[in-house]
Every structure is written in C-alpha cells, then in structure tokens.
Image (cartoon, rainbow, N blue to C red):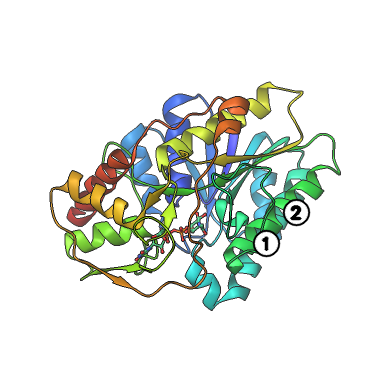
Amino acid sequence: MKILITGGAGYIGSHTIIEILENTNWEVISIDNYSSSSEKTYQRIEKITGKKVTYYNIDLTNLSLTEKVFQENTDIAGIIHFAAFKSVPESVENPLMYYHNNLNSLINILKCQAKYNIPNLIFSSSCSVYGNLTELPVTETTPLNKPESPYAYTKQIGEKMVDDFIKTNANLKAISLRYFNPVGAHKSGLNGEVPIARPNNLVPYITQTAIGKLEQLTVYGGDYSTNDRTCIRDYVHVCDIASAHVKALQKLVEDKNFEQHSIINLGTGIGVSVLEAIKAFEKVSNQKLNYKIGPRRAGDVEAIYANNTKAKELINWTPKFNIDEMMFSAWLWEQNLNKM
Ligand code: UD1
C-alpha cells in the first residue's frame, strides 16, 4: 500500500513516517517544501528505520506541481495531510500567510484526492478549533467557539471543507484528527522537533533554554483563573500522535462501513499547567530552568484538555506516554541536536 504524506519532513510528519516504516509494510512518499523543516529529516528517518522514503520538494499551493506527484504515483491508497503553518502567534501577526497556505494546500489536496481516486484522507486538525471553553474536558461534539487565532480558524474552515467535500463523493473517506499539544521526540533520540527560527512552542523553548541556546523562558501569563494561575494544556507524545495516524488509516482501509468523515480528539485527557510542565522537565533533566512569569500571549486559550474516549472506541487508540516521558525524550533529542 502506498501512502502520501504531506509535510513529511516536519515534526509530526516525520514521526508518523517512522511509525509507518517500523510497524507496517506500507510504502511512503512525502511532499514538503521545507518552509519549516529540511531535507535532512529523511536521513534521520533512514538512520532509525533503515528504509528510504521517496520525496518531492513541492509547494502544495501550486496545483500543477502537486498533480505531477499523483500522475507519477497512480497507486496511492491514502493521504495524510500534515503540511501547514502552525504557529498561533505568527498567524496573529500574519493572517493572510496562514489563510493562503493552509487553505489553498488543502483545497489542492482535496482536488487531487477526487481527481486521482484516492479513497482515504487523514486531515491534521487541532484542538484550537474549540476556542475558549467553559466546560472541560472537550468532546468532539462540544460546539466550536470563536477561533482565538487565524491559525485556529484555518483548522475550523479546513475541517468544514473536508466535510462538505467528502460528502459530494461516495468513494471518498476522511478522518480529521484534532491534536492537542504534541511534544517529545523519538525514543532513539535521533529525531525530534527542529525549530527553524526561535521556537514558539513551549517544550522546544524549555529545552533550548536548558541547553543555553536561549537565555530565559517567559511563562505567558500568571494571572489565569487556573490552580497555579498559568495556562493548562493537554500535552501528548508525538509518537502517540503518530501511532494514531496509522490506526486511523488502517481503520479507513479495512472498515468499508466506517463513517465517511469522522472527527477524533487526540489528547491524553490530562491537563498540565505551564508550571507543571516546567517541573516535569526539571525532574527528568535534573536541573533548574531559568524562567520568569510574563504577560499573556495573544491568541492563547486559558485551559483545554481532551476527552479521548472516541479515539479509543473508533480506532482503538490509547496514548502510552506520560509528561515525564515526553520531557525526557525532548531533552534527549535537544542534547543530540546540539552535537549535530
Ligand atoms: C496551539 C494549539 C494547538 C496547536 C499548536 C501548534 C491551542 C489551544 N492549541 O498550541 O492545537 O497544535 O498551537 O503550534 O490553541 N508558553 C509559554 N512560554 C513560551 C511558549 C509557550 O508560557 O515560551 C505557554 C503558552 O502560553 C501555552 C503553553 O505554553 O499556554 C503551550 O504553548 P504552545 O506550545 O505554543 O502551544 P499552544 O499555543 O497551546
């Protein structure tokens, strides 16, 4: 079975490719334009798995270039569409960049899915679609609130586009996976997140501060109405996220009666505050982190964590790793990255 991964050189894409190559006999082809990754990722994948990935350097907003991949590979059984911009603050500063890239690339992927008869699609969505919530944990039926950032809005629209489009063609199926906060790295310490510029996400910011690349971490907001006054998130190991993609795609391929478009939360169900995340890091790395409490960040929601029952029921997915293991693997990766 041949699977197309878009954004395969990126953080979640690369871990998913590794999961596929280590646990299935699927063949992988990848498309990436390296806007926030590099071709070197494929060498790391090969080192871990001993297997090669066929890859294309293509911008998915260019339809004719994207189509060439489908014309060259007439036997694709499924697409996992990761490729997107993903920084909440960057999207607040530069919304058009997010609307252009995230929506046009999805439109082109959907056009190709139909034109080249690719039965199955997995779409990377995000818990940011829920906006600010009053009731936690969130289930997939929780009504979506106003998106807090253009990034979040691209994911709300993206899910709706997938839904509307898939229903026009009975031969197509899709699952949208709403990731909570993917963190951590492959257990080998040989693959992880490689922030191209200064990181926006918490965990790479923590590990880069600890290793001395960054001077100090600022905790965004110490005045939320949570227990320790900092934001709460549902951090989930990137390898757990990767395994969910394999299970979701397997389900679509094997279960002909599966719903045409399902939406599934991918989180551990455990809310962790920023200060608790820092404490977990300090424990596993055996060092104190230099941080200060600063002002709130635009676009942030106060607290969010998942109800993950649907993932268990529909695709038999239960996350395996806890916050200490997430931090340990992220720290191992940061130390190895520093030696590269
Ligand atoms: C958001 C989305 C998530 C998406 C991710 C992609 C929400 C609720 N979640 O994650 O679905 O996958 O973007 O990037 O919108 N923090 C600090 N200091 C820092 C960096 C972060 O205190 O230097 C805090 C943030 O305020 C937040 C937490 O750490 O409370 C996590 O932030 P981050 O890692 O950036 O992810 P989200 O913005 O939660």
Percent position (x, y) of residue 323? Answer: 33, 42
- The vertical placement of 252 against 71, above or below, is above
Mark 2: few/some/many CA within 10 Å (<14, 14-19, 20+):
some
Q: Position of residue 203 (x, y in %)?
A: 33, 55
Question: Where 221 falls versus 65 (above or below)?
Answer: below
Badge 2 amino acid: Met
Q: Provide residue 304's location: percent of width, then percent of height.
A: 50, 52
| On-image quarter of the N terminus | top right
User: Disc 2 or 1, which lies upstream in sequence?
Assistant: 1
Q: Position of residue 7 (x, y in %)?
A: 52, 52
Q: Which residue is mark 1?
A: 103
Q: Is residue 230 above or below residue 304?
A: below
The quarter of the picture where the C terminus appears is: bottom left
CA separation, marks 2 and 1? 9 Å
Instruction: Give me the residue at 58% from left, 60% from top.
Output: 132
Question: To which residue does mark 2 refer?
Answer: 161
The residue drawn where x is 67% and y is 21% is 254
Q: Which mark is residue 128?
A: none
Q: Residue at x 38, y 75 (%)?
A: 295
- The one nearer the camera, 87 or 67, is 87
Residue drawn at (55%, 77%), measured in percent from left and top?
Answer: 94
For label 2, the SS is helix
Q: Number of callouts in the render?
A: 2
Tag 2–tag 1 contact (CB < 8 Å): yes
Residue type at mark 1: give it: Leu
Ligand 1 within 8 Å of disc 2? The answer is: no
Cβ at disc 1 under 8 Å from ligand 1:
no
Q: Nearest the camera: 134 or 52?
A: 134
Work out whether residue 62 or residue 161 is closer to the camera in this orientation and state it. 161
